């Protein structure tokens, strides 16, 4: 088994087919989307492939060590993560093919009008050791 992180992005990925921002959805469309995500996670719990998932709040900041005796530095010259990542799901599956299959299914979560989003998800394996294989 290998762990994969499926990332939902606000920006940075190609536009989804149903590209209506969530803040423009009807309340029942948001509820249907969340229910789809919860049902998907429940099914993966039953199969033993679910590890964890979270939606991320809009609040957040970059923090960096400011140096000895100095306070941490906040924010920076980079795009802020809160503007990019909407949420994530960590899965533990037998193969990359299974991770791709599940990401494709998760991409079909309903959006505006109840139609599938067809959103792009980033799928990344977790390192199980040092990148150089040691």
Image (tube, rainbow, N blue to C red):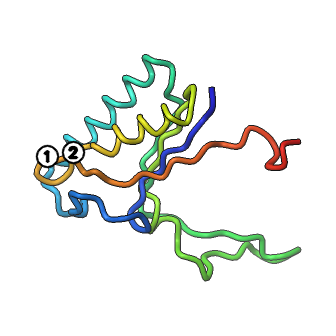
Residue denoted by label 1: 114
Mark 2 and mark 1 residues within 8 Å of each other at the beta carbon:
yes
Location of residue 40 in the rendering, given as x and y in whole percent from the top left corner: 34, 31
Location of residue 101 in the rendering, given as x and y in whole percent from the top left corner: 42, 35
Regarding mark 1 in the picture, which secondary structure is present there? helix
Q: Is residue 31 left or right of residue 100?
A: left
Q: Is residue 68 left or right of residue 76?
A: right
For label 1, the crowd category at 10 Å Cα-Cα, with few meaning under 14, some 14 to 19 and many 20 or more, is some
Distance CA(mark 2)–CA(mark 1): 5 Å
Of 67 and 1, nearer the camera is 1
Of 73 and 86, nearer the camera is 86
Figure quadrant of residue 16? bottom left
Residue denoted by label 2: 110
Q: Quadrant of the N terminus?
A: top right
Regarding mark 2 in the picture, which secondary structure is present there? loop
- Pick out the residue farthest to the front: 97
- Which residue is depicted at the point 70% across and 76% down? 73
Looking at the image, residue 126 lies above or below residue 60? above
Looking at the image, residue 65 lies above or below residue 9? below
């Amino acid at each position: 088994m290998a762990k994969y992180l499926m990332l939902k992005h606000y920006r940075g990925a190609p536009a989804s087919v149903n590209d209506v921002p969530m803040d423009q959805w009807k309340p029942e469309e948001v509820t249907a989307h969340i229910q789809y995500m919860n049902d998907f996670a429940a099914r993966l719990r039953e199969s033993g492939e679910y590890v964890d998932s979270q939606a991320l709040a809009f609040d957040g900041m970059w923090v960096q060590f400011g140096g000895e005796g100095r306070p941490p530095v906040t924010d920076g010259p980079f795009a802020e993560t809160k503007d990019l990542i909407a949420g994530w799901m960590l899965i533990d599956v037998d193969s990359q093919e299974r991770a791709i299959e599940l990401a494709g299914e998760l991409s079909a979560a309903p959006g505006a009008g109840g139609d599938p989003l067809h959103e792009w998800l980033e799928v990344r394996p977790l390192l199980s050791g040092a990148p150089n294989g040691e």
